[in-house]
Image (cartoon, coloured by chain):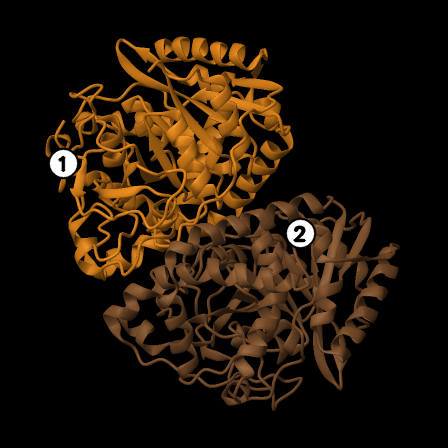
Chain colours: A orange, B brown
Amino acid sequence: MQHASSGAFLDETVFDPTGAGPLDGLRFAVKDLVDLAGLPTGCGHPAWRDSHPRAVSHAVCVEQVLAAGARCVGKTVTDELAFSLLGENQFYGTPLNPRAPERVPGGSSSGSASAVACGLVDFAIGTDTGGSVRVPASNCGIYGLRPSHGAVSVAGVYPFAPTFDTVGLLAADLEVLIRAAGVLLAREIPAIARVRRLHVITEAFELAEPAVATSLYEAAAQLAEQLGVEVTTTSLRDIDEDAGGQALDAWYDTYCQVQWPEIWSQLGPWFQATEPELSSFAQGSLELTRKYDRSRSLAAIRRREDLAARVSRFFGPDDLLCLPTVHTPAPLKGSHSVRGFSRTYYSRALALTAISGIGRLPALSLPLAEVEGLPVGLCLMSGPGQDAFLLAAARQAVPAPVA
Amino acid sequence: MQHASSGAFLDETVFDPTGAGPLDGLRFAVKDLVDLAGLPTGCGHPAWRDSHPRAVSHAVCVEQVLAAGARCVGKTVTDELAFSLLGENQFYGTPLNPRAPERVPGGSSSGSASAVACGLVDFAIGTDTGGSVRVPASNCGIYGLRPSHGAVSVAGVYPFAPTFDTVGLLAADLEVLIRAAGVLLAREIPAIARVRRLHVITEAFELAEPAVATSLYEAAAQLAEQLGVEVTTTSLRDIDEDAGGQALDAWYDTYCQVQWPEIWSQLGPWFQATEPELSSFAQGSLELTRKYDRSRSLAAIRRREDLAARVSRFFGPDDLLCLPTVHTPAPLKGSHSVRGFSRTYYSRALALTAISGIGRLPALSLPLAEVEGLPVGLCLMSGPGQDAFLLAAARQAVPAPVA
């Protein structure tokens, strides 16, 4: 596979390792929201690239993995201003999803997922605000980690919605992902986790397409067996007793209302001053954030903190939650132009990804199932700050690949 | 007291409340690192102000307090690019420290502290990366809160070192501070906290000037009495058993090494592109961040995470730590030009403030003592995320002012 044919890369400047360590010999790529010294950080839009000074240094997360022995082999395509979960960029194209070439890779860490899935790198750095690592990982059949909020430095990384922004990782091999995560988290990942319960979130499985739910439920049952625990069926109402029948809607709505004013705070000044040409999706999304009645922030943030506190209380130190990473396999390319698609897709996808965002939970998408030959990910989450436990549990639960 | 004579304000544009709530009738001001719609966010430097688009909306934290009933009465002076703990800005002057007019107010939330101490506002929003709320609170004899990292939205707030950046509060009245903090944290603050132990950190008191240590130790003993607990003397070595005799040096060094590359990531591109005229202190500080060998990041971040994990394990949910906010009362104006002053001042001040930064702990500076008529603050800290407990404990421990 050639780099060019994947469409994953924007730039193939190489940066050599600055030290030796657990990532010796590994190649990685970096999403175009993350600074690489001397290059522009374009955030998926030429107007952003051209109206900001070039990076003078690597982002801190890049320095960490270079110091641990990895070699950077380039910069990858992202969705326009990180606004989409699909991975189709009007300026830079659609990186290849090698598992389903007629389908999208997922976004916004589209090129990072593609580069990994095409075998062009061992791991890639992405960012995940509302699913931008987990969704492309699910679509492309690879591993994707969103760490606990605040656990990995975002210095030198474009801020989108700071309350939810994280630097995450994609890899085709779980052990590689864990080694790179150990470097970014600057923590040892234990060999074994003592898991007591694996909670399957009822409403999340109900939200997924039936075939996705069935295959992922089976994957969850296998995980539980490997961990030597029973699957516990848990309703979101066990966490949030205020929730009515549409529990996930409340999480989705809360996520949106906290995120929108943040995005407008971060992008609005540049947008008003520059008046860039945006795709209709990015334009529509930005308009939503501009028109949001910001005086509602206080109530939205209260609801978020209330939910986060409930989630925190729910988790024991040895509990794992699991749910479908996203409700469907990768959509066909061009789906965004189908009437009604975006509304349905995002309300369901974000309802699933919002749980970790709101709860500040680490979340790991595992490529453990397929639906009609298309990969779908099972998302495993632990309590906030329990990233090392989550990764150790995954290591224990997922059988090593046969060489 | 007139606004003009305090030198606290950069701009006196008024923004009316957008809702009613616990902050009804209160006036507040906002540090010039925080967006107010339609105004430039200058970060204490005219070149920054002039090279960035104006804010198109209030920062999320500002929206929260407006929605809770408070009225914004202006924007306050900050140190140049938030680089100093003193509060002397070559472009905008030195806001008045009404408790010691010949001395600095402290920085970088200099104007916010001054506006509160001069009685021009009921509370002020500041930011605290390495002490920028707590130090001016101590110098000016008011309350200053640095919340847990990540607990208050930084959307619309200039990023300096994102791993440590927080939005904080200053107020002359503890109850006002608690009400405003409840709004920003979006949490109820309980009336009572069940405190089990109040730890006095030996090394921190040893680092302070003897008169400061003596008066603050007495204040700590009174707090403990109010809380009905004994003072527990605790060494940092009880937390970090690896630490040698110079335990605080390790915390200071770790803080600097994690912070420096972050600051250069955030400021470097603008600085290289704009070549602004900086004060010699800001210039020197920025040079330090530019020259730092970034390949050392990994080791520094590992040390930070190790210390943070130790701190977290140390804290019970009912433990408080206390230490001097800063080692000395407010320095005389112009001290920065005294040879050797800056090195000594910062290495001691930051060693004290770094503990909460590294541990992601909330920290509250209480104006409970004086040394030769000059205010000094006692800093109270709880475990990470225990902001509500910390504030409730302060409410319980500090007698209400006599009306």
Residue type highlighted by circle 1: Gly
Q: Could you tell me which residue is drawn at 60 percent across and 88 percent down? A: B332
Q: Position of residue A172 (x, y in %)?
A: 32, 25
Q: Could you tell me which residue is drawn at 44 percent across and 35 percent down? A: A253
Q: Position of residue A363 (x, y in %)?
A: 46, 31
Quadrant, the N terminus of chain A? top left
Query: Which residue lies under the disc numbered 2?
Result: B240
Kindly state the secondary structure of the residue where label 1 is placed.
loop
Residue type highlighted by circle 2: Asp
Kindly state the secondary structure of the residue where label 2 is placed.
loop
- For the residue pair A252 and A332, the one nearer the viewer reads as A332
Q: Position of residue A287 (x, y in %)?
A: 28, 46
Quadrant, the C terminus of chain A? top left
Q: Could you tell me which residue is drawn at 60 percent across and 74 percent down? A: B136
Residue B164 has which mark? none
For this view, does A132 lie left or right of residue A254?
A: left
The relative height of residue B298 versus residue A127 in the rendered view (above or below) is below
For this view, does A176 lie left or right of residue A73?
A: right
* Quadrant assignment, res B212: bottom right
For this view, does B83 lie left or right of residue B268?
A: right
